[in-house]
Amino acid sequence: MTTTAPADVPTASAPLPGDEHRRPAIGPKLAAFTFKYGLVLVLVLMIVFFAVTQPAFRTVDNFLFILQASAVVAIVGLGATVSMTVGGFDLSVGATVSLSVMVAATTMVKFAMTGTTAILFALLAGVGVGLLNAFLIVIARIPDLVATLAAMFLVNGVTLWWVNGQSVAVGMTIDGKPAPGVFTEVFEWLGSGRFLGIPASVIVSAVVFGLVVVLLNFTRWGRALYAVGGNPVAAEAVGIRVRRYRVLAYVISGLLASIGGVLLVARLGRGDVAVGDAYLLQAISAALVGYAVLGANKPNAVGTLVGAVFVATLINGLTMFNFPYYAQSFVQGALLVVALLMSYTLGPRRRR
Amino acid sequence: MIQHHTPGGLGAAESSRTAPFVEISQLSKRFGATVALRSVSFDIRKGETLGLLGANGAGKSTLIKILSGLQPATSGTVSVQGEGREFTSPNQAQQLGIVTVHQNIDDGVVFGMTVAENLMLDTLGLFQPNPFLTYRKIRRRARALLEELELELPLDLPVEQLSASDRQQVSIGRALAKSPNLLILDEPTSTLSSREAELLFGAVRDLQYRGISVLYVSHRMSEIEELCHRAVVLRNGSVVSEHQQPLDLRAVTQSILGDLASTSLGAGRQHAPGDVVMRLRGVRSGKETAPFDLEVRRGEVLGVTGLVGAGKTELLEQLAGTRPLESGVITLNGSEYKPKSVADAIAKGVVMMPEERAVQAIFPDESVSRHLSIGRMGKVSRLGFMDRARERSFAEQVIAKFAVKAAGPDAAIETLSGGNQQKALVGRWLVEQQSLVILDEPFRGVDIGARAVIATELHEYSERAAVIVASSDPEEVLEVADRVLVMVDGRIVSDSPAFEMNSEALADAMSEVQRTTTSGAPQS
């Protein structure tokens, strides 16, 4: 006989009281099915319903329009997803979109540089915000949520200060003279160009989506990111450099937010103040809806894309039914609640 | 006064301490099918310090939880001053005079508040006719309390700026403010340095002087010997023995560890120690302990045993790169070895399976296969891309070799039993060539069958690499080891071939107590 039989530790067959897996009353099989396929099923049914009832909905152009409308949310949401894989949360993505919008617009309009330079500067700004977040979280050890909240205000403030709170548009007056630069061809193409009939923003978001899917699902770095989020202590114990991966996650998050900003400024054709701020909540909500897609129950690229497209489809279809634009927020909230119910209420209980 | 029976052989204690304050009778606690306590009976007398001893999982913490009102017992009674009582909340226990200072010192204090505020915490929640409370008032009351207790603490300092032992004094002060008749100290020295522990011993003697009963829970024999009038040993949820001062430490240790087989199980195994793989020179297990040398060879499983807190984990973590080297030089296969990180150690072929599986090795919701790849992703990926086929075949290899019962490589690891999880997690390191494999408490929560599989594989593997197995259970060590080290208070006190040892001899070595203090048994 040995003394290590852990009498204090209940065995798997004998859970502690109060730790029972409480399943909802609808039956475990149905719950499991809903958990896995519920959201996708709702999306498909919704598309079928709109397609049958609204002839304008079932056109290729409308389909591409929906994808175009969800492109920026999807890209920014994919960045937020990467920050979530390490167990973090990036509240500064909206501010980063705004920043890169302004950086790109100013580079071209005020400084009359090329579109390529503008893109480069915008992306560098995004990486910069990512590094700032990484510094606050990894080096200064401030919790993710509050660190990125502070970064959000800082970035917003710097952006506004820099442009004196003014929007940047072609032909605007600076010090009594008209601004020298214009939006170049690259930006015109990104804003309204097509390749093989597909809008440029859709192509860009497809490429970004593909890269994130590959990173998270098919590379060792993706494995390490999820490991850091799953159990940082265990990750450290198998030799994963936890701090480096958290830096990487926030840099990717900032970079993708700035790609979203470049697409946004190209579509708008001008640098509107604080235009990116709304993308924070939409991107985060797309990522959270994504938890419920195919029973992933964790941040994942496919889910985030579905989450972004879901909202755009819903709003597009409802608009055809003359649904008022001011109720869009309610629709988004309802979708988020349904998705969260699926992943948290119907999903397997997490042990905490 | 209520009549009570005095167990035989206890007449030595003087009359002032014979009246029981708390009598525990036939106390049992079940969690589902697991029995944590079975018919536990003993009493705690007025003014006495009673030691409560037992290995991990013996039921000590369950018992404390019941006594402090955190958990109800399944059956049995607890009488306080002769009256049977039901405890349903910590408040109720405190009203009866039972106050607990829990193991983690920082659970007892609130960071961000001053010492004065912390001392008065318990009164903040009480109803008072005057709802206004100034810091001055709090401070005045706290000062009065410290004067009464004859303690000296800086009242206005934020509690987090205090040393560990001062923070503990705050917790104890808070507890004493409730004027307890019984103070339960749950492993009070587990996070203290030896100097700080001395301060605590002084405080406990002070309690004895005031006539307060103390239930002193500890793994450390020296503390029990120094402070306690009596000691009770729990094993597998039952009281197995009671000991009087002067304590027979050998008997106490044996009683904690259980029925010891008289022969070593590893005795029959043939082994030939091979080349030295790792050589330690002047290495220490902690800052305050003496340096030592050690050689770890291929061809033998090196067992390291010692009671909890003896420094096994601290030593092994230095080898695995988890903890920086305290002092000395390590060579690995002849060249200097100074791991900068765990990744560096793994790259050099030194791998360690940590002690707490659930906390240090399990990724919630992830599959078996992913757990097997995670520490060795370079081997299952190409240019950064995961090679799923190779990953899968590796997983199948481990599952087959270690007879892991799982629905398949893609099953979530949490669907496996503890033993099967352990087989998989140990197995991932034993398929490929390493220099040194370290397993810390590999048999904790692992069934006999899985232990046998792991032991067999370790023996086979030790032909190719050095293997270290650490456990606080000498039986377990003898099950696998060819050579056994015993650690006591950070020192290696014995190093001998397993066939020369049996578990009784190991227990003797483990109970060797370093007498650092001048005072012996407590004065009565």
Image (tube, rainbow, N blue to C red):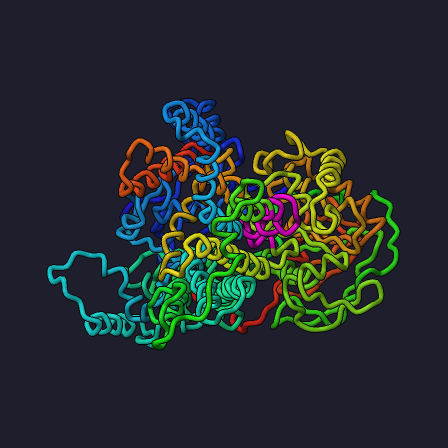
User: Do we see residue B252 in this rendering?
Assistant: no
Q: What is the x, y in percent for residue B374?
A: 66, 48
Residue B43 among magenta residues: no
Relative placement, left or right, of A150 versus B495 is: left
Q: What is the x, y in percent for residue B257?
A: 61, 47
Residue B129: image quadrant is bottom left
Q: What is the x, y in percent for residue A288?
A: 43, 43
Q: Residue furthest left?
A: B129
User: Do we see residue B285 in this rendering?
Assistant: yes
Which residue is drawn at the image coordinates 46% and 59% (left, top)?
A: B229
Which residue is drawn at the image coordinates 57% and 59% (left, top)?
A: A248
**Foreground residue, A112 or B391?**
A112
The relative height of residue A251 versus residue A312 in the rendered view (above or below) is: below
Q: Which residues are magenta?
A: A211-235
Residue A223 among magenta residues: yes
The chief SS type of the magenta part is helix
- Where does the C terminus of chain B fall, quadrant-wise? bottom left
Residue B28: image quadrant is top left
Which residue is drawn at the image coordinates 37% and 42% (left, top)?
A: B71
**Foreground residue, A267 or A262?**
A267
Q: What is the x, y in percent for residue A277?
A: 37, 56
The relative height of residue B284 versus residue A71 in the rendered view (above or below) is: below
Relative placement, left or right, of B74 versus B375 is: left
**Foreground residue, B161 or B244?**
B161
